[in-house]
Each structure stands twice: as C-alpha cells, then as structure tokens.
Amino acid sequence: MSEYDEDTLTEMGRLGLDPSEFTDADLADGGDGEPEGLVPAPVLAVVGRPNVGKSTLVNRLLGRREAVVQDIPGVTRDRIAYDALWNGRRFTLVDTGGWEPDAKGLQASVAAQAEMAMQTADAVLLVVDASVGATTTDEAVARVLRRGDVPVMLCATKVDDDRLTSDIASLWRLGLGEPHPVSGLHGRGSGDLLDRILDILPESPRDLGFGAPGGPRRVALVGKPNVGKSSLLNRVSGEIRSVVHEVAGTTVDPVDSLVELDGEVWRFVDTAGLRKRVNTASGMEYYASLRTKAAIEAAEVAVVLIDAGEPIAEQDQRVITMVEEAGRALVLVFNKWDLVDEDRRLAMKRELERDLVRVRWAERVNISALTGRSVTKIAPSLRTALASWDRRVPTGRLNGWLSEVVNATPPPVRAGKQPKILFATQAATRPPTFVLFTSGFLEAGYRRFLERRLREEFEFTGSPIRMSIRVREKRSRK
C-alpha cells in the first residue's frame, strides 16, 4: 500500500510524520465490496441417467470449470446451481445427479434431488448419450417430463463428429421434439444449444413463494467428512436440499441454498469434506477440495463443523487454518452434541485449551443437526462475527488507545534499542487490517499482545485480524 487515505495523511501530518519515510509492506485486503444483490433469474435443470455427460455439458455451457467431472458414474449427487450468461441474458443452470427409476439407498436420494430440480425449474434439458441411444431409463425420464407443464428440450451429447448424426434421428421416439446434437467435451453445437435454451426460458422465473430484497450474506459450511454439514443445511433450509448418507464424502460439489434463519435470509453453501491436503489429494477428491477452497474464499463467514463426539483432529485444525488464511469470519459449531456425555465434555474442555487456543476469538455454538437442538443460536453468532469483520475503528480513537497501551507496556528492547510505535491506522476491513508505523521491528510476541488488547477494546469477536508493520527508513547523510 503506497498511498494513504485523507484521514491517515491528516493524522500523520499532525504528528509531523512523512509518509515517504516508511517502507511499503504487502497488505492482505479482504475486500470492501458490498454483498451482491439477489437478482432473480430463470432456472434450467439439466437431467438424465448416470454418466451421460451432464456435468461436462454444464461446464461447457457455463464456459468455465465448475462441476466436478470424472469418468465414473455417480460423481454428482446433489442439485447444484450455477450462474450462467449467454448473449447478455442471465439464467441459473442446475446440475443434477443421475436419475434412475426404482433406485435404492444413496442413489434413491440422488434421484429425489433430480426430481426436485425438475419440479422447481422453469425449463428442463434432458441429456441423452447419442453413442448409446435411448435406453429404458431415458424413456422412463421422458415419460415423467411429458406429464409435466414445464418446457422440455432434448439434447444428444457426445456427438463429437458427423458419424453419429444419422443415429440421432432415433431419439425422436422419446416424444420430446427435435434432439439437439452437442459435444460437451469439444463444444461442438454448444452455441446453437444455448440459443435454443434462451428461446424456451421465460424472461423471469416462476414465483415459488421464496424471495428476499437485498443481498444475503454468504456462509460456507466446511469441515472434515461426515461431521454433519449436509444434515445442518437440510435442517436450516427445512427441506432435503443436500443428499445425506452414512458413507463419508457424499457431497462432492458445493451446494448453494437460500435459507431463512432467525428472520433473515442467508446464502448457505454446503461443501465437500476436506480429507487431505489439496496438493496430496487426487482425482475427484482433488477437484472437490479445490471447489471447497473456492467456496471459502467466496464466502463472508465460514461455519466450521466439528464432531463433538470425537477428539479434535489435525484435519479440523487444518480447515480452521484455511479459513484464517482466507481472511474470513469464523464460527465454530460443535455438532452431534446430543451424543456427548459428561466425560466427553471434560475431555473436550482440555482439547479446546490445547488445540484451539489460537482461535479463542471465534464464536462457539453447540448443536445437534439431527434433532435441531440449538440450531437457532447459529444466526446470532454469524451476525456477531460479520459485524466484527466489517468493523472500522476511527484513526483518532485507535491512536489514543494505542498510546495508553504502549505507555503501560512498551515494546521489548531489540539489539540494544527500543522501537517506538509512531502511528497506527486501519487500512481495510473484511478482514480488519491494521498498519503500525514504527521506528524499528516489533517482536512477534508483542504483536500478538497488541492484537489481543485490540480485540478486547474494540470487540473483534469472530473475525481474524491482520497487522502489518512499517518501519521508518533511515535517511542517508549527505
């Protein structure tokens, strides 16, 4: 940061400080933008049987890699919404898991999510594998879609060249009109398909009885696998929004939902459980980890879920570190509290003092996503954390407080000299970023001391604080 705002320059001039005498330091600015507005857009649901290339086609229509893709069936399990843009028109593209009739177990939950997407969409795109032709599953899906009152368009995917053109005519028997050939992998025919999509989509979405003015705050649900992230999302949303199964790692793509909690609309994002470091994961797990990291960076506050019935693991601490490094507000939610007995509570108290001492500033909530116990306490904690994340301290008040603290506890002597703190200012919010102008280097311990006192004085609860030191340059003698 080489330039200072007017308030900072005025205060530095009053103290007789020259801004050019201080070395520049890199500041991590969390951004000062306002939350995005909630803009209604028509919804297109992409459905079909497993492994026909729906997610590959979705990425092609979006023009970017969003959905996790792997050459095995069943990668996508939830209904995931993405913002799409074509020819100046915005619409929402919903990717779904493979739909199969008479599915059992986990696949039945995936099929239920696909059916929900069909019922709530403004139009449906049925994807069929042109290299295989219409199967009995495709015919079953087509029968369901023909009974509905939503516009349906048929897409024949994996048409990479002209050899399959003659086989596409057989898809007319599905009774959904003209099949549109496209290659999700190479992009062949994707532009024509997008033009037809805009033709069948309405200008505005259907009124489904849910909406909110303004922009909802973005909340990311993160944690290691099987801690109850999807169960919590379903609990607060009041519907089966995310597939839940006892098998760890059910969620792969981030699931985005608008949720009304404690009288306020929030945008919750359920993410994949982080099992390994991103650089050591592979395949589907690697791309799921990347999506989770991107969801944290796109959020304003992260809710880190921890299994209260198990000891705090290294992976829990790694997830918290990711949130800290991203500079996002933090709320720690201990789930499955209904399974915690007295012995476990005593053990957890010791674990908190030992393993989470560096995030004492984070809000903590004990809940049970299964029974709904204390779930309503999450919203007040989110508001407290976001208020700290947005807080700005006036320069005059900050320097008055800093003078009192330094006079009572001066910085330690270093190399025979005691550094002086000449001036301080808050350079940014989201997260709160402070710059200290000094005559020498400040020890890490003293900086932690200042951060702790700063939190106590100005109530920065639930938000990380970044502190940068700028040392006055020595002028060369002429």
Image (tube, rainbow, N blue to C red):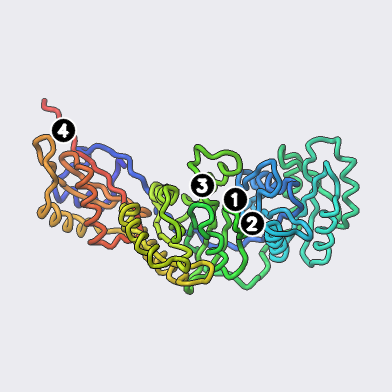
* Quadrant into which the C terminus falls: top left
Counting other residues with Cα less than 10 Å from the Cα at mark 4, is it few (<14), some (14-19), or many (20 or more)? few
Label 1 close to label 3 by CB (< 8 Å): no
Query: In whole angstroms, how far apart are the C-alphas of marks 3 and 2?
Result: 19 Å
User: Which is closer to the viewer, label 3 or label 2?
Assistant: 3
The numbered mark at residue 275 is 3
Residue 443 lies in quadrant: top left
Label 1 close to label 4 by CB (< 8 Å): no
Query: In whole angstroms, how far apart are the C-alphas of marks 2 and 4?
Result: 60 Å
- Residue 81 visible here: yes
Residue behind mark 2: 78
Measured as percent of width and height from the top left, residue 79 is found at: 65, 57
> Label 1 is placed on what type of residue?
Val
* Quadrant into which the N terminus falls: top left
Query: In whole angstroms, how far apart are the C-alphas of marks 1 and 4?
Result: 54 Å
Q: Nearer the viewer, residue 340 or 200?
A: 340
| Label 2 vs 4, first from the N-terminus | 2
Label 2 close to label 1 by CB (< 8 Å): yes
| Label 1 vs 4, first from the N-terminus | 1
Residue at (21% x, 50% y) in the render: 424
Residue behind mark 1: 252
Residue behind mark 4: 474
| Label 3 vs 2, first from the N-terminus | 2
| Label 3 vs 4, first from the N-terminus | 3
Measured as percent of width and height from the top left, residue 305 is found at: 46, 58
Counting other residues with Cα less than 10 Å from the Cα at mark 1, is it few (<14), some (14-19), or many (20 or more)? many
